[in-house]
Image: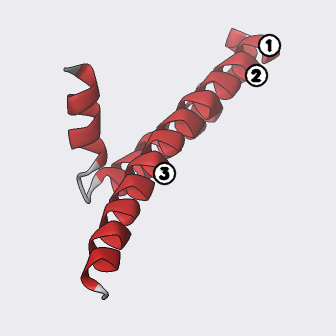
């Protein structure tokens, strides 16, 4: 069930734009707030985790697009005699 929901979200044409603004928000937030309050280590960990989440979402997005391309190629190969 969760997999189907994730596939539905990844198939939306607006998802790359949403991902861009989400990542922009994640990477600008630590610099907008005072980094001295949280400490350098906490800021580093936050940026690393934000980067990991974005990479994971991009991985899922690329797998979804690769699946679409394979299906399209398979259908066109069957039509060629």
Question: Label 1, on which residue?
Answer: 41
Q: Is residue 30 visible?
A: no
Would you say the residues marked 1 and 3 are in contact, meaning their CB atoms lie under 8 Å apart? no
Of the numbered discs 2 and 3, the one sitting upstream in the chain is: 2
Count residues near mark 3 (Cα–Cα under 10 Å), then give few for <14, some for 14-19, many for 20+: few
Q: Position of residue 8 (x, y in %)?
A: 21, 41
- Which quadrant holds residue 77? bottom left
The answer to which of marks 1 and 3 sits earlier in the sequence is 1
Location of residue 64 with respect to 79 vertically, above or below: above
Q: Where in the figure is residue 26, as x and y percent of width and height?
A: 52, 34
Residue 7 screen position, x and y as percent: 27, 39
Give the residue at x 69% y 11%.
37
Given contact means CB atoms under 8 Å apart, are the residues at marks 2 and 1 in contact? yes
Residue at disc 2, secondary structure: helix
As drawn, the label of residue 62 is 3
Residue lying at the far front in this picture: please name it: 81
Q: Residue at x 64, y 20 (%)?
A: 46
The one of 57 and 40 positioned closer to us in this rendering: 57
Q: Measure the C-alpha gap from mark 2 to mark 3.
A: 27 Å
**Residue displayed at 44% across by 56% down:** 66
Q: Quadrant of the N terminus?
A: top left
In the image, residue 25 sits, relative to residue 75, either above or below, namely: above
The mark found on residue 9 in the picture is none
Task: Choose top left, top right, bottom left or bottom right for residue 22.
Answer: top left
* Residue at image location 31% in from the left, 87% down from the top: 80
Report the Cα–Cα distance between label 1 and label 3.
31 Å
Residue denoted by label 2: 44
Task: Give left or right: position of 7 versus 30.
Answer: left
Please name whichever residue, 18 or 72, is drawn nearer the observer in this view of the structure.
Answer: 72
The picture places residue 41, in percent across and down from the top left corner, at 80, 13
57 relative to 14, above or below = above
């Amino acid at each position: 069930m969760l997999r189907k929901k994730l596939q539905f979200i990844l198939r939306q044409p607006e998802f790359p734009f949403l991902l861009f603004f989400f990542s922009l928000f994640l990477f600008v937030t630590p610099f907008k707030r005072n980094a001295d309050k949280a400490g350098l280590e906490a800021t580093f960990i936050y940026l690393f985790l934000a980067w990991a989440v974005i990479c994971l979402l991009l991985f899922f997005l690329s797998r979804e697009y690769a699946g679409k391309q394979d299906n399209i190629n398979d259908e066109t190969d069957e039509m060629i005699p």
